[in-house]
Amino acid sequence: MSLSLATKLQSTACIIPLLFAVQTSAATILFDDDFQDTAVSAPTSQADLNVGVAVGTWTVTTLEESFVQLALDGADHVLTMDQGNFDITANFAQESTLALEPKISMEVGLRRRSGNNKHNFIDGFDADDNRLFSIRLNGDEDSNSNEVAYSTDGSTYTDLEGGLVWQAPAVNSTNMKLVEIALDATGWDLWFDADDDGTMDAGEFTTDLSFIASPTAGLTTLQFTGESSAGARVDDILASQVPEPSSLAIAVLGGLIGLIGFGRRRKR
């Protein structure tokens, strides 16, 4: 006896939601810290940071003039690193998989701008300590050039055309800017939302950048450093990747196809 059309439709209706459920995998969070659970204090220690981090850990090499402070809204906590005396590392909870295209986002702001070459750096390293990418915040030839810049060789930096002058003498949503980094197995992309409109405008992004060193493992750490009297603020650091569709989704899809095929064969 063949399956009726109603039966096949009912079976299909049951399977399709399950298929979408297993195919739509939640992102794996590799690192997450918005500093909200880190006490407002000065200076801020490695122990302070690790009490508050949601996913991952912090390693502090140098963090002399630093503090977690309240933004102007009186609620948001922001990590401020000052005077160039900082070298801290965000350690992922697990090694990323470059083929899964991990993404990193954070809010950044400049603490100091007057004077030349007050550079702050954000560098990404894989599990074998290969330096994959480098971003420079603040400073250039003069005190009025504070673009976001990037490097593909570890020493020469190129400014993003849309990386406009900005500073965060006080912390609020206007002078903290979104930076996003997206990686895959062959390279990386960079976006700096200079005008806070949430869209990738001309000059604010660059794509298909080469890695500084060829990766031999997945990205596992972000290092924040400053040179000579530099200063920066950072908030809402999030690193994540989306897993591949599970084998269960494939099995469910196979079952759906088999069910329809069985009904057709029986009808003959």
Image (cartoon, helix red, strand yellow):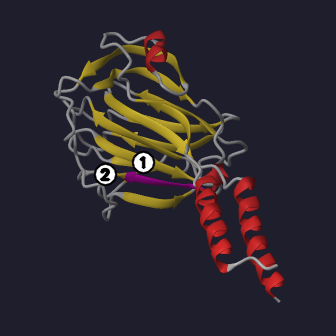
The answer to whether the residue labelled 1 contacts the one labelled 2, judged by CB atoms less than 8 Å apart, is yes
The quadrant of the picture occupied by the N terminus is bottom right
Residue 81, placed above or below residue 3:
above
The 10 Å Cα crowd at callout 2, few under 14, some 14 to 19, many 20 or more, is: many
* Left or right of 192 on screen, residue 133: right
State the image coordinates of residue 172 (x, y, percent, origin top left). Answer: 20, 34
Q: Nearer the viewer, residue 20 or 115?
A: 20
State the image coordinates of residue 218 (x, y, percent, origin top left). Answer: 67, 42
Q: Residue at x 68, y 73 (%)?
A: 8
Q: Which residue is mark 2?
A: 193
Q: Residue furthest front?
A: 1
On whether residue 163 falls in the magenta region, the answer is no
State the image coordinates of residue 130 (x, y, percent, origin top left). Answer: 65, 39
Q: Calculate the distance from the C-alpha at mark 1 to the C-alpha at mark 2.
A: 9 Å
Q: What residue range appears in magenta?
A: 187-191
Secondary structure beneath dot 1 equals: strand
Q: Nearer the viewer, residue 74 or 256?
A: 256
Q: Which mark is residue 92?
A: none
Q: Residue at x 27, y 34 (%)?
A: 110
Q: Residue at x 66, y 36 (%)?
A: 95
Secondary structure beneath dot 2 equals: loop
Q: Which residue is mark 1?
A: 180
Inspect the image, locate mark 2, and give the three-letter code of the amino acid beneath it: Asp
Inspect the image, locate mark 1, and give the three-letter code of the amino acid beneath it: Glu
Q: Does the rendering let one see residue 154?
A: no
Q: Nearer the viewer, residue 79 or 137?
A: 79
Place residue 160 in its image quadrant: bottom left
